[in-house]
Image (cartoon, coloured by chain):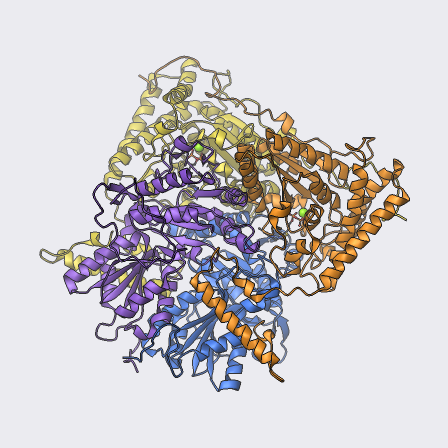
Chain colours: A purple, B blue, C yellow, D orange
Amino acid sequence: MTAAPASRTSPDAPAPAGTRPVTMAQALNRALRDALAADPAVHILGEDVGTLGGVFRITDGLAAEFGDRRCTDTPLAEAGILGTAVGMAMYGLRPVVEMQFDAFAYPAFEQLVSHVSRMRNRTSGALPLPLTVRIPYGGGIGGVEHHSDSSEAYYMATPGLHVVTPATVADAYGLLRRAIASDDPVVFLEPKRLYWSKAPLDLDQPPAALPFGRAAVPRTGTSATLITYGPSLPVCLEAAEAARATEGWELEVIDLRTLVPFDDDTVCDSVRRTGRAVVVHEATGFAGPGAEIAARVTEGCFHYLQAPVLRVTGFDIPYPPPMLEGHHLPGVDRILDAVARLQWEADWIPGTEGRPHA
Amino acid sequence: MTAAPASRTSPDAPAPAGTRPVTMAQALNRALRDALAADPAVHILGEDVGTLGGVFRITDGLAAEFGDRRCTDTPLAEAGILGTAVGMAMYGLRPVVEMQFDAFAYPAFEQLVSHVSRMRNRTSGALPLPLTVRIPYGGGIGGVEHHSDSSEAYYMATPGLHVVTPATVADAYGLLRRAIASDDPVVFLEPKRLYWSKAPLDLDQPPAALPFGRAAVPRTGTSATLITYGPSLPVCLEAAEAARATEGWELEVIDLRTLVPFDDDTVCDSVRRTGRAVVVHEATGFAGPGAEIAARVTEGCFHYLQAPVLRVTGFDIPYPPPMLEGHHLPGVDRILDAVARLQWEADWIPGTEGRPHA
Amino acid sequence: MTVLEHTGYRPAPPPGWQPRTDPAPLLPEPEPYRLLGTGAEPATPGLWRELYRRLVLGRRYNEQATALTRQGRLAVYPSSAGQEACQTAAALALRPDDWLFPSYRDTLAVVARGVDPVQALSLLRGDRHSGYDPHRHRVAPLCTPLATQLPHAVGLAHAARLCGDEVAALALVGDGGTSEGDFHEALNFAAVWQAPVVFLVQNNGFAISVPLAKQTAAPSIAHKAVGYGMPGRLVDGNDAPAVHQVLTEALDRARSGGGPALIEALTYRLDAHTNADDASRYRDEEEVAAWRGHDPLRLLEEELRRRGELTDELVAEARTAAESFAAGLRERMHADPRPDAASLFDHVYAEPTAQLRAQHSRLRAELAAEAEAASAPGGGTGPGRDAA
Amino acid sequence: MTVLEHTGYRPAPPPGWQPRTDPAPLLPEPEPYRLLGTGAEPATPGLWRELYRRLVLGRRYNEQATALTRQGRLAVYPSSAGQEACQTAAALALRPDDWLFPSYRDTLAVVARGVDPVQALSLLRGDRHSGYDPHRHRVAPLCTPLATQLPHAVGLAHAARLCGDEVAALALVGDGGTSEGDFHEALNFAAVWQAPVVFLVQNNGFAISVPLAKQTAAPSIAHKAVGYGMPGRLVDGNDAPAVHQVLTEALDRARSGGGPALIEALTYRLDAHTNADDASRYRDEEEVAAWRGHDPLRLLEEELRRRGELTDELVAEARTAAESFAAGLRERMHADPRPDAASLFDHVYAEPTAQLRAQHSRLRAELAAEAEAASAPGGGTGPGRDAA
Ligand SMILES: Cc1ncc(C[n+]2csc(CCOP(=O)(O)OP(=O)(O)O)c2C)c(N)n1
Ligand SMILES: Cc1ncc(C[n+]2csc(CCOP(=O)(O)OP(=O)(O)O)c2C)c(N)n1
Ligand SMILES: [Mg+2]
Ligand SMILES: [Mg+2]
């Protein structure tokens, strides 16, 4: 794992001539294709990944190009898919599993927690599981019940897994290549509402595999730090733009890219500079990803903090029906509200009589 | 749900004459018995819960007394157990399900997350699921792999579930009665290493069902607050005793009792008084229960905090083999170390140049 | 001298050995069971005409729902065109006290059971997760995670039996769903408990794009029954009278303590998986055409014609009822549902937690501010801003 | 005039209908297959004597391991006394390149495959999760979560076939484990993929306290095979030659592309579930006594005696080997394993994360402080303090 410095580029910035706009879905498809071409051990498994090319078309054309032994339509059973992938990895293959939607990965939970995450540890390294579990996640696409879950908190709480989620087209390619090349199991969360987001990318000179554990800083700023990932990155960038326009705040935006391993350096470096932070994600707040992020940022930056780290997240409710999801998802206004509550002048916590620092 | 004030009694304090020492296992058994006797809708389901009385004997004698239609040995399939319990609850019964060990609840994860936690919400209240899932959890009993997991973070991150865990004999009775009487699904986590802990309890005059959302304060103090629950409560009490003896610190100890709903009032009230807090639990730290606790305590008490809320938890590793579990589990020394790091005098965070409060 | 003492020659089978059920009666018929075209008579007079009327309505319902997706009135619609015989017969075979456990594809069965179609479509419209009162018609919510509704049906049937009620449950699942662990666990529990539950597999040959041959290598799905100790039946799922009869028998048997059954109905979805699916990617028009020739509506129509029962009157009556049903549905679905944002916090728990109450009041404040901004002259970006 | 145009009478079955496999050959024999006492001859000369030697050793191993629990040398031991024929035959039927997928009860099979018994017992001793190198003998780690190892076996067998290797996998599971969803999914994948994997169910009549009748209502567990389209075989699990033959045939067939098989071996565990279990709570001594009469060791011994092959020499040789094996095991198990606390952080990931490195160094500091305190005169509460 190369310890490259955190990139400080804005996401999907204008790229050199010769590149053309591609969607995140295309970038992921290309990453799979290139991985299949580069390593005969790579095998794709899942529901509808073959002939159909996946319900989101991420595996489009791969069965045709590499044959259905490399890109295989499985029976409809997620525990079976992941469990057989474990066996294939034990034999030295490098399976890439697709779960059709986030909530449909739950049947495979036991295999993931009791085996995938622990096999290397259990066998003192004798049976590593180089296995990638691709999971489209998050809402915002008008999906009906069970089609918009954000379950990253479950995976983050499971030692032995890497938890990765791209927010940009280029990162989608680079992180997926890295995930497939990883000798550890990776839960690769694809923000489904960004599948159709576009950015220029030269697919003939695709970007290098990205190291894990390195957050990106797509926007620098001095007033406060927005810490986010995946589907909430564009919302945070929009909020940062609005904050400058309306309040003159310069918000720094951090795209974590990998939730595990967590890039403490980049995050703490930013928060120590800005003194204020808001964590933004779609998943529910209580015991959600933001809890860990807020807790560790507070541990690492306590004396630099002018205000508690706040969280803007989905409500603590089951994901709502599509007609109401707009009210549930963190949006620009809520982010700006949270930033405004970062104690720019006075005490604010309802019910507490805030007192000045000692 | 009665909003009783947080009890400020020490756990299992000497009880009135006539009571005799009973184990937590016996108290749980009695709670189940009394629930079966009180309400014909209550049905117990699980692996080995009938003839054998459960591998921990929590259901001992119940099939004999109430018949195997009320206390039923099921086929060996956790998703099937929970899934059929959902159907029974839909018909108006009040199932109490036993999962044999914490890790063996994972096969039922999809049923729990996609149905148990959401059925009331999905049906706008038409199909509440008054269903209790009893799960022995935690380590410290020398159990081999998969027998010592602490999975409460998964359940906390799932809206729609109550997550309850007693730490004392009396609470075991009172909380289990309340759980079974609840019209919502409850994940009832039983600290297996406290099954054999004893305290006097008058089983002929058993305690009332305890309300959810009310933490206990088994030890009051002014120097700092230890926030804990379940298996770590005795360890925290021991640490508090040692802290007084060796350092003269008076540690307040909070037993959360219910992780969901969370008792912000009791916890924040304490931390605002002490200005310092340490969260203690066996589960792994990263994205563990302590993350939420630390984050919300910080949000609620920021200006009262003299130091960041620290966490003493299991390491971020798969639960180790029994011969090494002593090194993994939070013990008295680690708790005291954490308390010592609560910035009693100077900056401490490694790698940061701590600066004095503004 | 030896490790074990000698006690003589023992050619006996292991102690206690006996097959607990005779497998033969559990195996399905070798050919799918049919009534149409066999010269059989309706079980009750008029039943087939009633099925015909309902099939016509069912087909019209599918067409109308599909049209509503094009008009943006449904988020998604998994059509059951081609499977109307199964869905209709399923609803008709049930007694009022019985329960139906449908999947996402079974809104027609739900409607045929008496649920208001607008309510039945709530999930797919996107205004609520489930639009009907499950108790009123004894219909569980539409279930999306495959096969997970099967153990619910078993549990409910078991509970009814424990309560002494004569109630059966009918659980619907697709061919793909039979691969899930929950299918296995549900059938096993049902058989061990002898629960009054009937499992109807609508084998339409595909799980989205995946054909049956990639789903199972079994002689038939119905053959799975013997592995649980329950009877398996194989029926032509496009022969409405046959499906109705097989289900009625199985439900009667279940209700009277005879235990569960597994029924495989061979059918075909004539439409794509949902309106969002492109079926041309994975199946030939020829195959679809062959199945159009075996359309459930056509099969029944031909039989009625042969029997001289396909009167102009019946045809007109069926069509009129279907058209007026469709018109009513269309009209009501064109009204904008306005689900209340505040309902987000209802029914998460019996009583909202303090935490949810706080979140609720924050949302209320947001909505109030938005409303104010919107009503202010020239004001407001509206609620759209947060709806990223 | 009608909804569908008339195209004539169609009594045909649904398009494309054909049972894809003939069910008859997939059904198990009506009575458990046996060789002992039938007059059959060993497949290869000396095989039965070899099995005898290994059964004697297996029994002794079980006794020794149980004794070690009483001496506090094992955290727990799930004895396979009474099931030695299955475990031994399983190991012997495998070729060197084949893989074994054992459960917690199958340490004897693991040992019989050649794994050092001290390493095989690591999990149960409590010093490591898994003590042996899985690649060396091609034995997967002992699996505790029931039936979860079955899909692993399928995946490995499938991978071997994809790689063109002639390798089969043998997966062991108990009667209780067959109720889990993973059993179903694994068998289904195996059959659809025609993976070279054999599933051996050791049906010992109980899942801890739960008897088979509460586990399944099937005619036999072997009957489940037809539901996946693979052959089911029923064998007397205490007839070591029969188990060996059935497994050998199934593995040969699998290796040569014939697909998977499900084998149910009827057996009995003579001991309690584990040393921590009290079997008197759920079963009669009579039943145990009946099975003692059908002890695998006794059955084989009697057969060898009938054949005049139970020579004093063989008996002595078997006993001596077993005793010396037990003595070696006992002695090595009485040494204290000292697993290194620092190993906690090894192998969580290929490379430790910064977070784990930090936790590791904190633990190192603790250990150093403890060591210092312990070595200081009169010092130290020792590591026990943190070991709550
Ligand atoms: C557990 C789970 N996994 C995956 C899906 C996604 N999915 C929805 S429908 C479907 C195919 C189902 O096929 P089948 O059971 O044959 O029913 P049909 O759609 O043909 O009626 C899939 C894979 C799901 N809903 N639930
Ligand atoms: C998923 C899971 N659930 C529960 C258990 C606890 N448990 C261990 S052994 C056992 C009984 C297993 O019975 P069976 O499969 O017949 O195997 P046997 O012990 O008889 O060899 C149970 C319930 C487990 N290990 N895994
Ligand atoms: Mg289908
Ligand atoms: Mg068994």
- Along the line of sight, which residue is nearer the eye, C38 or C272? C272
Q: Position of residue D136 (x, y in %)?
A: 63, 47
- Along the line of sight, which residue is nearer the eye, A228 or D275? A228
From the viewer's perspective, is residue B324 above or below residue D300? below
Q: Quadrant of residue A250?
A: bottom left
Is D66 placed left or right of C73 in the picture? right
- Along the line of sight, which residue is nearer the eye, C137 or B273? B273
Numbered-mark total: 0
From the viewer's perspective, is residue C121 above or below residue D117? above
Q: Quadrant of residue D36?
A: top right
Q: Position of residue B103 (x, y in %)?
A: 54, 56
Is A49 placed left or right of B14 in the picture? left
Q: Using the rendered image of the protein, determine whether residue D273 is visible from the camera's viewpoint.
A: no
Q: Using the rendered image of the protein, determine whether residue A170 is visible from the camera's viewpoint.
A: yes
- Along the line of sight, which residue is nearer the eye, C337 or B37? C337
From the viewer's perspective, is residue B227 above or below residue D182? below
Residue at 25%, 62% in the rendered image: A252
Q: Position of residue B249 (x, y in %)?
A: 47, 84
Is D293 placed left or right of D79 in the picture? right
Is A39 placed left or right of D192 in the picture? left
- In the image, ligand 1 is in what quadrant? top left
Q: Position of residue C329 (x, y in %)?
A: 28, 35
